[in-house]
Image: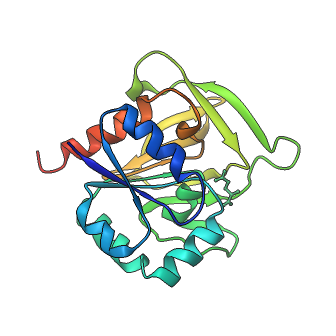
Amino acid sequence: MSVIGVLALQGDFREHANVLRTTGCEAKEIRLPEQLDSIDGLIIPGGESTTIVQLMDSFGFINRVKQLARGGMPIWGTCAGMIVLAGKLMGDRPEPLGLIDIEVERNAFGRQIDSFETMISVPVLGSEPFKGVFIRAPIITLIGSGVEIIATIDNQQVVAAKQNNILVTSFHPELTDDPRFHEYFSTMISGVGN
Ligand code: GLN
């Protein structure tokens, strides 16, 4: 059984762990960098990206997560987690880890539509649409040539993407009762080494 770590420094890590458990994976809340050695994949949850990066830095996570990512460990960032993994941000805070070749704009939907839900077509999950829960969500403003588009809204705005072992979603699959995104991430883990 795969063991999936959920970075538990700040944000909605419990919700991720709960969905993972319904998919038959073992979910482990990660609070110290040493715990990264016993997992097969890592989720960086939604929350506040500046706080998450600051805590990752003070607890000594940054280099270890970069090393594991470069070694092929699947990592999935949702919302704030996507900001943490980005190659570049519009704006200067926080400093992202640079693990996926995308540029991201924080809080990109503006005050008027702070939070919303919309059904999204996600071909890798099958034909049934997926409920996208967007909360002060970032958007992807530039996408590198090696990055695969996983989902768009309004036919052009990229809201989920993947580059090799790194997956990002600007919405929160952990806040739905639909486990398909978590199941998809676990197939990325079982694909490692095959
Ligand atoms: N706006 C938050 C940030 O910039 C992300 C919001 C979220 O994760 N729901 O970090």
In the image, is 178 to the left or to the right of 190?
Answer: right
Q: Nearer the viewer, residue 110 or 141?
A: 110
Please provide percent x and percent y for residue 47. 63, 57
The tally of labels here is: 0
Q: Quadrant of the C terminus?
A: top left
Q: Is residue 165 above or below residue 95?
A: above
Q: Given the current orientation, which residue lies at the most extreme right position?
A: 112
Q: Quadrant of residue 123?
A: top left
Q: Residue at x 53, y 64 (%)?
A: 84
Q: Residue at x 45, y 37 (%)?
A: 19
Q: Nearer the viewer, residue 55 or 70?
A: 55
Q: Nearer the viewer, residue 108 or 42?
A: 42
Q: Quadrant of the N terminus?
A: top left
Q: Given the current orientation, which residue lies at the most extreme left position?
A: 194
- Coloring applied to the structure: rainbow
Q: Is residue 139 above or below residue 67?
A: above
Q: Given the current orientation, which residue lies at the most extreme top position?
A: 127
Q: Residue at x 66, y 62 (%)?
A: 48
Please provide percent x and percent y for residue 156. 61, 35
Please provide percent x and percent y for residue 168. 48, 49
Q: Quadrant of residue 31?
A: bottom left
Q: Quadrant of ligand 1?
A: bottom right
Please provide percent x and percent y for residue 193. 12, 50
Q: Quadrant of residue 184?
A: top left
Q: Nearer the viewer, residue 23 or 43?
A: 23
Q: Residue at x 39, y 40 (%)?
A: 20
